[in-house]
Image: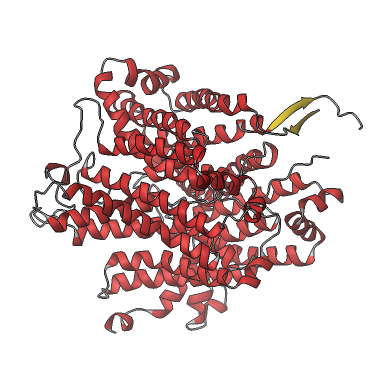
Amino acid sequence: MDALVSINWVLLAASLMVAATPILLAATGELVVERAGVLNLGVEGMMILGAISGFAVGVRTGAPILGFAAAALAGAALSLLFGLLTQILLSNQVATGLALTLFGLGLSALLGQGYVGIKTPVLADWNVPVLSDIPVIGPVLFRHDPILYLSLLLVAGVWAFLRHTRAGLILRAVGESHDAAHALGYRVVAIRLAAIAFGGALAGMGGAYISLVRVPQWTEGMTAGAGWIALAIVVFASWKPWRVLLGAYLFGGIAVLQLNLQAAGLKVPVEILSMSPYLVTILVLVIISSDRSRAALSAPAALGRTFHASS
Amino acid sequence: MIRLEKRPSPSQGWTAATPLLAVALTMLAGGAMFALLGKDPLAAIRTIFWDPLFGEFAWYFRGQLLVKGGPLILIAIGLSLGFRAGIWNIGAEGQYIMGALAGAGLGLALYPDAGRWVFPLMVAAGAAGGWAWAMIPAILKVRFRTNEILVSLLLVYVAQNLLASAALGWLRNPEGAGFPGSRNLSQWPAAANPELIPGTGMHWGVVAAFLAVIGAHVLLSRHQLGYHIRLAGQAPRAARFAGVSPGRLTVFCMGVSGALAGMAGLFEVTGPAGQISIDFASGYGFTAIIVAFLGRLHPVGILLAGLLMALTYVGGDNAATNLGLPAAAIQAFQGMLLFFLLSVDVLTNYRIRFGRREIA
């Protein structure tokens, strides 16, 4: 019990949001991609490439915000490679996504050669006037960096886009039945490529959030499965934006809690604590997928299927 | 106007030719990448692909080829069965680690027994460890329809943490002066997996890999189960109507790939690696995915692809020492190979037509 008492719960709640943001960004992007009917398993690869590009540009220019822009570009560029292969050359999406991850890990390690052990200028926190002075709630909610607020805005934006706009309706139609959407005259491939690029940009920014804000440093393979957890959270969320937020923050909470317990010297081996986020993710996946009606109803019907206009 | 026209059935010629085309394209793109890194591309390609086979020190490198190729082939053969049936086990890295831990754990429990049965028992435990680890995503998929891709991959991170706790704690060498890492298994004759013919790199793991190639070939071309695997991948609905149980197929394919990956881990820990250490996992489980695809999910193809991929490892080491090429460049190179392979695959399944399409 001593370990639990010694934890500063206000600080923990604040760092929970920071820990959740990389996954929230990547999962929000992947949600849009999957709603368009494309399964991009390369999230991990795009995140790690975003992490190194963002870090490198952040160090070179001294402006972390430029790093985020570079990370978004790098993530989108890598995702368009996936788009080219799966949408135009009609390759298998699962295999291509895996290739993207393997390639991204290798390329980022290569690019990151000169950046190990370097410090980066950190993104300044943006204290919301007045609100940040409220006790407890202030430090938890209103003393964060702009990217964290942006990630929340993006969730709201994606929700509104999918639910209330015509373009969002078309994107969902493409994801439910690409043949019907094609017959109606929508350009399935172009819409999917746009969704893929958006997902790549967000995954890249999520990676950069790890290397520029959360850690902030560059080490090889530093995303450590965050991309895979983001994919799992999209399933957990039943492809709904607000549930992605819930899932990411739940995961962030576990990640931060286990780190705090490690630091507080709880009598549980460190390795057990560090594997707990992955175990919890698996457990949550099992619970969600065991509900037959829900899982089957909410997945986009054309998810992962190759579109080829044969007629 | 260029457009694609689906072939009635995949082209036989292109099926064989696309891997070669992909390798050629990768060499071009890889050469460009090496040039960007400030290395002479021709020298880099020669150092990676030619010198290990025919250069001055080829006698050493040729042995390394089998050492690296053995585990890749063994793991990829198992993965290919599942991939053919549309069952995606991408957590072979975790099964590889768990096989090594289970086998080494059993062996170290028997230390210092000198019986001849120690090594075979360890191999069996290694296979069982990998099998059990693969059964987690398999059973979750069958019982709860949980996505096996995500579960098997997430379990890799769990296995890596278990590996770290074993190397630092419960499998640490009691006579190792507190250093991390287990007893050296390769120096304990009863558990060692030595080089069988000096200079060739041939060890029991390589033998097992060759046996797996033959076994998979027989299974896929001569056995009903192999037919079911191919059927389930190409026409899942037809397979269900024909009475193929998707659940049993999942358990079988995941089980075999897990057991083979676990054995690969055990052969590695008792041979080339020698001991359980924190950095024991070397990514064979992930590279084997590339090997399986490069080999067209065909046993003989995987054998050749495994040797080629081993060559990039060996040649990459060579280039790292001689040209100062970063080790990560080889990883990017291998990823690139898979990209090119997947993109030229379009030629196998589609015809490219030029000109306007005529109105039917």
In-image side of A232 versus A298 (left or right): left
* Nearer the observer, A130 or A48: A48
Please name the residue shown 32% across and 59% down the image: B161
Report whether residue A248 is seen.
no
Tell me the quarter of the picture where residue B321 sits: top left
Coordinates of residue A169 in the picture (x, y in percent): 79, 61
Coordinates of residue A90 in the picture (x, y in percent): 67, 39
* Nearer the observer, A144 or B278: B278
In-image side of A267 versus A118 (left or right): left
Please name the residue shown 73% across and 27% down the image: B352
Coordinates of residue A172 in the picture (x, y in percent): 75, 59
Tell me the quarter of the picture where residue A225 sits: bottom left
Compared to B270, does B50 lie above or below?
A: above
In-image side of B302 versus B194 (left or right): right
Compared to A240, does B130 lie above or below?
A: above
Asked which colour scheme the image uses, the reply is secondary structure
Tell me the quarter of the picture where residue B41 sits: top left
Please name the residue shown 48% across and 69% down the image: A251
Q: Quadrant of the C terminus of chain B?
A: top right
Q: How many marks?
A: 0
Q: Quadrant of the N terminus of chain B?
A: top right
* Nearer the observer, A306 or A191: A306
* Nearer the observer, A138 or A272: A272
Report whether residue A281 is seen.
yes
Coordinates of residue B66 in the picture (x, y in percent): 31, 30
